[in-house]
Image (tube, grey):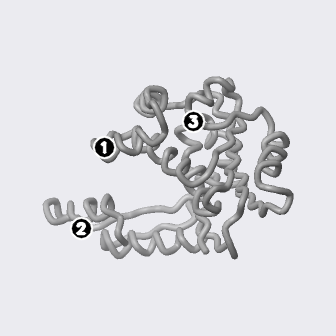
């Protein structure tokens, strides 16, 4: 509901009639765990409801500190992929909180348009302005990171060089322990912590 991209896709049937669809839902290991078939809207929505039932997780309240991992290799192979987990974790963190993103990113940023947006930006806010002026696939993920930064600081525990990470408007750490210690120093020892080990496929809701 309210997803303009999905609405555009659904409207395609007005021009190219769709007789039948077969969609599948995958688990963390890419195994098929459900199949839906039939009317292109009704079957799709049934798949969405099933997906929501297993990947939406209710939390009692937002946390001061969220520690999130995309779920390991290959989901954290680059920042382009790891951004999915960062986006989901933003739903669980309080305004002014800290997100600790644990992602190897051993292959760097991972996508040419995304890389250009991140490295050419004068500020994180400039990426939000840019995407509003002209949408560009790949750039949308850079703008999504900027939207998270409006809400919280992001500590990145990765294999990337510290100076390079700072160019991305993120705060670099080489290990989780140091990142957690710094987060508590910033927010106090009573800060509430939430851990998301499979952040790429977990959507926190209150």
Q: Residue at x 86, y 57 (%)?
A: 189
Categorize mark 3 by other alpha carbons within 10 Å: few (<14), some (14-19), many (20+): many
Q: How many marks?
A: 3
Q: In the rendered image, which residue does mark 2 sit on? A: 19
The residue carrying mark 1 is: 135
Q: Label 3, on which residue?
A: 169
Q: Which of marks 3 and 2 is nearer the N terminus?
A: 2
Q: In which quadrant of the rendered view does residue 198 lie?
A: bottom right
CA–CA distance between discs 3 and 1?
Answer: 21 Å
Q: Nearer the viewer, mark 3 or mark 2?
A: 3
- Assess whether mark 1 and mark 3 are in contact (beta carbons under 8 angstroms): no
x then y, percent, for residue 98: 68, 51
46 sits left or right of 77 in the view: left
Q: In this view, does 5 lie to the left or right of 97?
A: left
In this rendered view, identify the residue nearer to me: 174 or 70: 174
Secondary structure state at the residue bearing disc 1 = loop
Look at 44% across and 70% down and name the residue there. 36
Which image quarter holds the N terminus? bottom left
The image quarter in which residue 11 lies: bottom left
């Amino acid at each position: 509901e309210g997803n303009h991209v999905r609405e555009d896709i659904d409207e395609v049937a007005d021009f190219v009639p769709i007789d039948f669809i077969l969609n599948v839902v995958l688990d963390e290991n890419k195994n098929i765990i459900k199949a839906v078939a039939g009317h292109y809207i009704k079957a799709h929505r049934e798949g969405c409801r099933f997906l929501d039932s297993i990947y939406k997780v209710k939390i009692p309240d937002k946390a001061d500190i969220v520690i999130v991992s995309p779920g390991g290799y290959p989901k954290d192979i680059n920042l382009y992929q790891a951004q999915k987990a960062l986006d989901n974790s933003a739903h669980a963190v309080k305004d002014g909180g800290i997100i600790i993103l644990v992602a190897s990113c051993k292959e760097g940023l991972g996508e040419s348009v995304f890389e250009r947006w991140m490295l050419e930006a004068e500020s994180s806010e400039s990426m939000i302005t840019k995407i509003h002026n002209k949408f560009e696939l790949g750039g949308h993920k850079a703008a999504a990171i900027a939207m998270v930064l409006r809400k919280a600081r992001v500590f990145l525990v990765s294999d990337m060089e510290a100076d390079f990470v700072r160019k991305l408007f993120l705060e670099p750490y080489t290990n989780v322990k140091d990142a957690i210690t710094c987060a508590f120093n910033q927010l106090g020892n009573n800060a509430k912590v939430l851990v998301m080990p499979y952040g790429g496929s977990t959507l926190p809701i209150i």
